């Protein structure tokens, strides 16, 4: 067989250390190791790593794990709609809560300021329309007055001439 | 399955499909099936998270959260993957998030501050001497530090591969990467551990 380290198949050594090679592949690799010092050394060291990891036992399981879990499940089932709503926010770290709180505060302040200025009511907007119409009418009146003045002055000139 | 690799894990695949069936029963409101799943996966989840975060109290708390999430998401559960893959995806997500938050808060890796909650060693017939116990604890500390020094994904991959004997495809689904990426992750991780631990020999 080709050397796994030289033929870009080094993962084979992981499978060998894990005991995941089938008997045919394992025999072929062991025959190869007899002639390949590099693979032999690597496999021996991987076996040592495997053994070191085997020695790392996890601690004993907590005795009250299930009782606490079912207690939390029951507690969740009894939550009010308001508690269910805010529950996703509770485990948030402080640095995630602060920007949210700041944003909510800013929105609240902006809302209060707008409230203070007073909303734009339909009556107010129609008042603006009325004022615009009045201005237009006034301008029309002034125009008419101008025409009237010019007409009356020409009439007076005409009478003086007569 | 990879050519040349044992197919014994096919037996585990059948068992995992059964877990998905149990979870579907939980979805229908069967609390007993949830108890069966909890009984079967409680220890693997706690041990996996413990080896990942290396703090017993945190591991217990995060494991509680894992099973709470499983229970709370029962109504939306769809067996698109093996149950264990789904379970370990939740566990890995929670544990890596905790590690990132912890690392961010402390500003650096906690390699020199591994909690001393060493497991009680099972001694069957002969009690080891105090000296042997000390040597064991020193070496075990070295193992834990070497694992803790691995990048997060490599660490999670090694723990699932070594202690949970999960297949490459399962690990790939948990970590959200390709099978070849998992093989590469594992090889690099074991090479790093070899550089740090190979001198120890058998503990």
Image (cartoon, coloured by chain):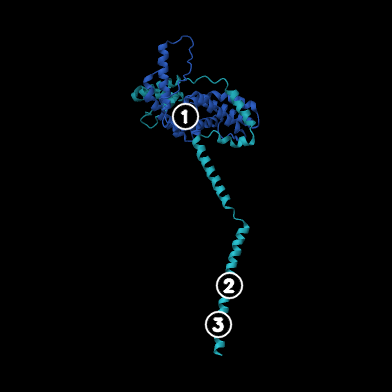
Q: Indicate the position of residue A10 as horizontal and vertical percent values.
A: 39, 29
- Rendered shade, chain B: blue
> In whole angstroms, how far apart are the C-alphas of marks 2 and 1?
84 Å
Disc 3: which residue: A153
Identified at 57% across, 76% down, the residue is: A145
Chain identifier of the cyan chain: A
Whether pointer 3 and pointer 2 mark residues with C-beta atoms closer than 8 Å, the reply is no
User: Badge 3 local density, few (<14 within 10 Å), some, or many (20+)?
Assistant: few
Q: Indicate the position of residue B35 as horizontal and vertical percent values.
A: 61, 25
User: Badge 2 local density, few (<14 within 10 Å), some, or many (20+)?
Assistant: few
Q: Indicate the position of residue B122 as horizontal and vertical percent values.
A: 49, 14
Whether pointer 2 and pointer 1 mark residues with C-beta atoms closer than 8 Å, the reply is no
Per the rendering, the mark at residue A140 is 2
Q: Nearer the viewer, residue A85 or B142?
A: A85
Judge left or right: residue A140 versus residue A7: right
Quadrant in the picture for residue A136 = bottom right
Of the two numbered discs 3 and 2 in the rendering, the one whose residue sits closer to the viewer: 3
The residue positioned farthest toward the top in the image shown: B126
Label 2 residue SS = helix
Quadrant in the picture for residue A121 = bottom right
């Amino acid at each position: 067989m080709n050397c796994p380290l030289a033929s870009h198949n080094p993962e084979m050594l992981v499978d060998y250390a894990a005991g995941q090679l089938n008997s045919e592949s394992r025999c072929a690799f062991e025959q190869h190791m007899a002639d390949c010092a590099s693979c032999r050394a690597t496999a021996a060291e991987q076996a040592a790593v495997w053994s070191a990891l085997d020695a790392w036992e996890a601690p004993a399981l907590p005795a009250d794990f299930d009782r606490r879990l079912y207690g939390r499940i029951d507690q969740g089932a009894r939550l009010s709609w308001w508690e269910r709503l805010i529950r996703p926010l509770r485990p948030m770290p402080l640095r995630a809560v602060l920007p949210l709180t700041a944003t909510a505060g800013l929105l609240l302040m902006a809302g209060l300021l707008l409230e203070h200025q007073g909303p734009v009511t339909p009556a107010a907007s129609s008042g603006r329309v009325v004022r615009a119409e009045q201005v237009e009418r006034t301008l029309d009146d002034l125009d008419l007055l101008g025409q009237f003045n010019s007409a009356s002055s020409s009439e007076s000139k005409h009478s003086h001439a007569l | 399955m990879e050519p040349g690799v044992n197919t014994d894990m096919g037996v585990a695949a059948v068992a995992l499909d059964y877990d998905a069936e149990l979870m579907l029963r939980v979805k229908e409101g069967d609390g007993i099936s949830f108890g069966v799943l909890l009984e079967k996966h409680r220890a693997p989840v706690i041990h996996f998270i413990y080896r990942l975060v290396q703090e017993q109290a945190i591991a217990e708390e995060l494991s509680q959260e894992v099973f709470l999430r499983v229970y709370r998401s029962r109504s939306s559960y769809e067996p698109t993957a093996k149950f264990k893959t789904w379970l370990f995806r939740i566990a890995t997500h929670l544990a890596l998030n905790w590690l990132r938050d912890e690392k961010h808060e402390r500003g650096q890796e906690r390699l020199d501050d591994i909690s001393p909650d060493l497991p009680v060693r099972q001694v069957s017939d002969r009690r080891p001497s105090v000296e042997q116990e000390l040597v064991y604890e020193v070496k075990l500390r070295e193992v834990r530090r070497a694992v803790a020094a691995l990048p997060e994904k490599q660490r999670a991959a090694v723990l699932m591969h070594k202690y949970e004997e999960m297949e490459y495809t399962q690990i790939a689904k948990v970590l959200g990467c390709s099978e070849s990426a998992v093989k590469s992750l594992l090889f690099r991780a074991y090479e790093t551990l070899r550089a740090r631990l190979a001198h120890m020999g058998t503990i």
